[in-house]
Image (cartoon, grey):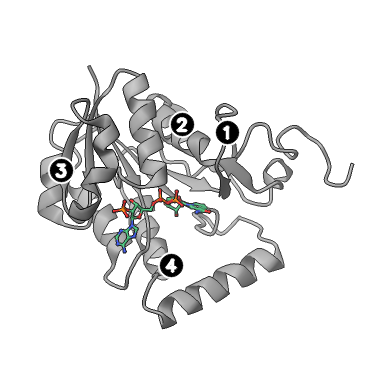
Amino acid sequence: MKKVCIVGASGKLGQYMVQHALNRGYEVVGVCREKSVGKLDGFKGRIAVIPGATNNREVIKKAVEGCDGVLTVLVPWGIHQYSSGTAQAVLDYAPPGARIIFSCGWHITRDGQDVYSRSFKLLIKVATWIGRVLRAVEIDDQVEACRRIFASNTPWTVVRGSGLEEGESQGLPLWSRHVGDPVLASNVTRRVDFALFMVAAMENDELIHEAPAIVGCQSRSALGIKAGS
Ligand SMILES: NC(=O)c1ccc[n+]([C@@H]2O[C@H](COP(=O)([O-])OP(=O)(O)OC[C@H]3O[C@@H](n4cnc5c(N)ncnc54)[C@H](OP(=O)(O)O)[C@@H]3O)[C@@H](O)[C@H]2O)c1
């Protein structure tokens, strides 16, 4: 039986990933903040939970032991290098050869070839500035986390999510190497399917060393429907 660690298991994305991993018969270890352990009560007896901050190196070292895959929700909360600390601990301690898969948004670019709309660029600029002023979110640190992942030789994948919505699964999202590809234009994915893509990537070697930008498979752009038609 394959064993996976889900770092950030108590969040919305994390809980969906836990369910998909269990559906595939994986043994699951979840990491979440101590105060959030109760959010995983629905999985009691079916997963192991290791409480602690996801950027705590000792917590990650223990959690990823013996795992075939590590799925990480890369969030930039606070101003304490939460994303880069989490990513570095996973890169350092995931067993050699384990698939490591990270989540982030479209704003992360691997090779600078992504094409963003002016409104998207403005949104990111404003969010980065407000996050910094309020000392609540450190988007620059998520960029730094991804820079370290891209430079790593581990078998990583960075899944770049579009805007997210709740709702029933529509199936595995479509992906493109670059934002700006018309297939992504709808900029919407069901959160449950973002999680599905993360878990399915475990078994998809074509995604190793890729940063797929994803979009819902039933979205207008994925179906090839032009906006307004
Ligand atoms: N939301 C979007 O529209 C969007 C779009 C594109 C990509 N993404 C990417 O999707 C991933 C998760 O997105 P999501 O919206 O679905 O969120 P989510 O799953 O609810 O994840 C939030 C995570 O952040 C943790 N968290 C919340 N407040 C925290 C704090 N103050 N300190 C430390 N950890 C804290 C949560 O843990 P607790 O359970 O302990 O609170 C949870 O693990 C991220 O990688 C994000 O970059 C999101």
Which amino acid, by three-letter code, is at mark 1?
Answer: Pro
Q: Quadrant of the C terminus?
A: top right
- From this view, report whether residue 178 is shown above or below residue 2: below
Who is closer to the viewer here, 153 or 163? 163
* N-term-proximal mark, 2 vs 1: 1
Location of residue 31 by image quarter: top left
* N-term-proximal mark, 4 vs 1: 4
Q: Residue 50 carries which label?
A: 3
Measuring 61% from the left and 48% from the top, which residue is drawn there? 178
SS assignment at label 4: helix
Q: Residue 139 carries which label?
A: 4
Which amino acid, by three-letter code, is at mark 4?
Answer: Ile
Decide: marks 2, 1 in contact (CB < 8 A)? yes
Check disc 3: other Cα within 10 Å, few if <14, some if 14-19, many if 20+. many
Q: Where residue 214 sits in the image (x, y, percent)?
A: 57, 41
Q: Residue 173 carries which label?
A: 1
Mark in front: 2 vs 4 = 2
Q: Residue 196 carries which label?
A: 2
* N-term-proximal mark, 2 vs 3: 3
Mark in front: 2 vs 3 = 3
User: Does residue 220 appear left or right of residue 151 in this picture?
Assistant: right
Which amino acid, by three-letter code, is at mark 3?
Answer: Ile
**Spatial separation of the CA atoms under disc 2 and disc 3:** 22 Å
SS assignment at label 1: loop
SS assignment at label 2: helix
